[in-house]
Structures are given as C-alpha cells and as structure tokens.
Amino acid sequence: MAVDYEKMILDLVRPLVVNPDDLLVKVLSDEDAMITVQIMVNQDDLGRVIGKNGRIANAIRTIAYASAARDHKKITINIESF
C-alpha cells in the first residue's frame, strides 16, 4: 500500500498553522529508496511548525520516518518559510 506522503504531512501540519492558505507541501523527489518533502509555511507560522527546540518538527519527522520505513524507504523533510 503506497502512502501519499504529501497528504499525510499536510494533514499533520495544517492544524498547527494560523495561515493555512499559505501552507504548501511538495514532494520534490521520490526515487527508489529516498523521498524528499518540502514544507513551505508563512513566516509567522514557522515557529509553530518547528516548535520549541524543534520538538514538533522532530515529531513530524518521526511519523514520516515510520511511515516510509514500512515501504523500505528513507524520507527527508525540509521546513522553510516564504
């Protein structure tokens, strides 16, 4: 069963941001064993998505890593602002 990483990460991040219209999640590359996902948020929401000491970002990455591991893949998530 293939996982839609874009939708999964969008569903995780959308409740965290104040400006959901500015949220963009894009899968940049989906090679055989490596997936790269970019999360773009409004500058005001960057702290909310990263969290104190990066705890929220690490939680998002942990969920994505576990999901990718089921497909025998590795995932990289980049969080940036506009």
Image: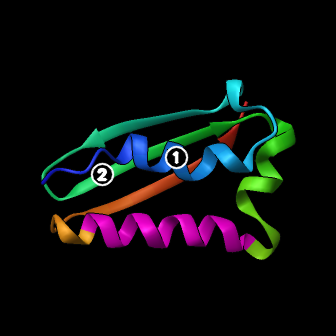
Answer whether residue 56 is magenta in the image: yes
Residue 35 is labelled as 2
- What span is colored magenta in the figure? 54-68
Q: Residue at x 75, y 43 (%)?
A: 17
Residue 11 is labelled as 1
Amino acid on which disc 2 is placed = Ile
Left or right: 16 as drawn, with respect to 32? right
Q: What quarter of the picture does the N terminus occupy?
A: bottom left
Q: Residue at x 69, y 37 (%)?
A: 41
Residue 6 in the image: state x and y as whole percent: 40, 41
Are the residues at dot 2 and dot 1 in contact (C-beta closer than 8 Å)? no
How many numbered markers are drawn? 2
Residue 11 in the image: state x and y as whole percent: 52, 46
Residue 33 occupies which quadrant of the picture?
bottom left
Secondary element at image label 1 = helix
Secondary element at image label 2 = strand
The one of 74 and 69 positioned closer to us in this rendering: 69
Left or right: 50 as drawn, with respect to 32? right
In the image as oriented, which residue stretches furthest toward the top? 21
Q: Earlier in the sequence, mark 2 or mark 1?
A: 1
Which of discs 2 and 1 lies nearer the camera? The answer is 1
Left or right: 51 as drawn, with respect to 69? right
